[in-house]
Image (spheres, coloured by chain):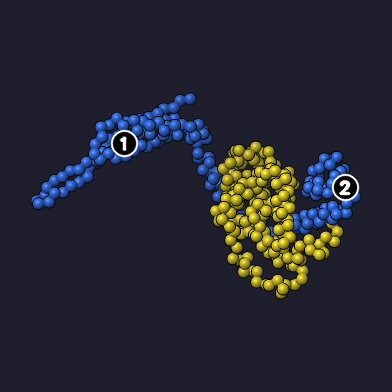
Chain colours: A blue, B yellow
Amino acid sequence: MNCEAFRESIYDYLDETLSLSEQKGFEAHLADCAGCRDALQRESQLSNRLKNDFERAVSATTLDHVDRRRIVAAAERELTERSDRPKNSFWTHIVSPIAAAVATLAASIWVGSQPMRFPPLAPQSSVDTDYRNHEVRFRVSLSSGGYIFRKEGDQVIDALTSDTVFADGTLVVTR
Amino acid sequence: MDEADLVGALKNGDSAALESLVETHGTRLLRSAMLLCGNETHAQDLVQETFVQAVRSIRRFRGQAGLYTWLHSILLNLTRHHHRDNQRLVYDNELAAKEVVSFEERPSGLDFESASLELERALRKLSDSHREVLVLRFYEQMKIDALAVHLGVSKGTVKSRLHYAIREMEKLLPPEMNLFGAHGTKEKI
C-alpha cells in the first residue's frame, strides 16, 4: 500500500470496515511510514474531539414534557386522519380520477353537441364519490346567457339572463 | 416493547406506541436537528414534522434500516427543504446576542458554553452538504458506508466531503478548539 491509498483508507480503518488483507496492508504501511502515522493520529484525534464537541454542544437541548405532548398531539391528529381515510386505495387513486376524467369528457362532448347561443359560458362539472356504495355521481351543467330589454318610460333597461341546463349521471363500479 | 413491536403498533394506529416513539427518539432527533439547522425553534418544528410524516408513512417502513435511521432520513429531507425555502441560514438573534465577548477578551481555555457557541457558529458557516456530513459523522457517528446510503452518494463522495468539511472547520474553529493547531497533533490518542 502506498501513501495515497493509505490516506484514502483512513476512514475505513477507523470504521473497522477494511477486509483482513486490506487491514494487513494498511498496518504494514503504518509501521513503515512516519508521515502516514501522523496523518492517522490526526484523524483519530480529530474524530474523538469532534464527537465530544458535537455531543457537548447540544447536551443541554432536550425535548421536555410539554414539547413531547405537543409533538404527540400533532402526530395523533395525523393518526386520526389516517384512520378516517378509506383504506382502499383502489377508490382514491384509481376510480375517482377516472370518474372525473369521464365526467369531464362527457361534459365536453355534450357541450359540443349543443346548439350555441350567445354568449356561451363555460361548462361546469362536479364529481362526488360515495365510497360506501362504490358509486361516483357526476353532474355537468351548461349555462347560456342572453339579454332582455324592456322599456320603462323613456329608458331602455337591459338585463343579462342565464339559462342553465343540467345532466346527472352515476357510475357504479364493481370489482 | 422492541422496535418490531413498536413499528407494528404504530402501523395499527396505537397512540401509546406513538408516545413511546417520541419519548425514545425525540431528544436525539432534536439535537441532530439543532446541529443541522442551527436554531432551536426551527429544530422543534422540524422534529414535530418528522414525527407527523413518520406516522403518515409508517406503513411503508420495511425495517431495512433501524427506526431511528429512518426517522433521521425524514428529518434530513425536511431540513434540506427548510434550507431551500430559506435560501440561506439566518443567524439566531438569541445566539448572536450571546456572542458579545471579543476573541481577545476571552480566557485562553474555552469554557463549556463558549466552545459550544464556537462550534455552532462554525457549523453555520459551512455549506449544507458539509454540515450534513459532519453532523452525521461526528454526532450521529455513522460509518462511511452508512453515510453513503443515508446521503444517497458514493463512498468516495462522502470521504471527499468529509475531508473538505474538516479542513473548513480547521479554519473556522478558534485555535483553542483546533486540533490542527501547534499543539494538537502532539496529543496522545
| Secondary element at tag 1 | strand
Q: Amino acid at mark 1?
A: Ser
Q: Amino acid at mark 2?
A: His
* Residue A159, image x, y percentages: 20, 46
* Residue B58, image x, y percentages: 60, 41
Query: What numbered label is drawn on residue A29?
Result: 2
Nearer-the-camera pick, A1 or A82: A1
Q: Residue at x 58, y 41 (%)?
A: B57
Describe residue A116's horizontal placement relative to residue A5 as left or right: left
Q: Going by the picture, which residue comes out furthest to the top?
A: A175
* Residue B8, image x, y percentages: 64, 38
| Secondary element at tag 2 | helix
User: Which class describes the residues within 10 Å of circle 1: few (<14), some (14-19), or many (20+)?
Assistant: some
- Which residue carries the number 1 mark? A141
Identify whether B65 is placed above or below B117: above
Identify whether A46 is placed above or below A175: below
Q: Residue at x 40, y 28 (%)?
A: A171
Q: Quadrant of the N terminus of chain B?
A: top right
Q: Residue at x 27, y 31 (%)?
A: A114
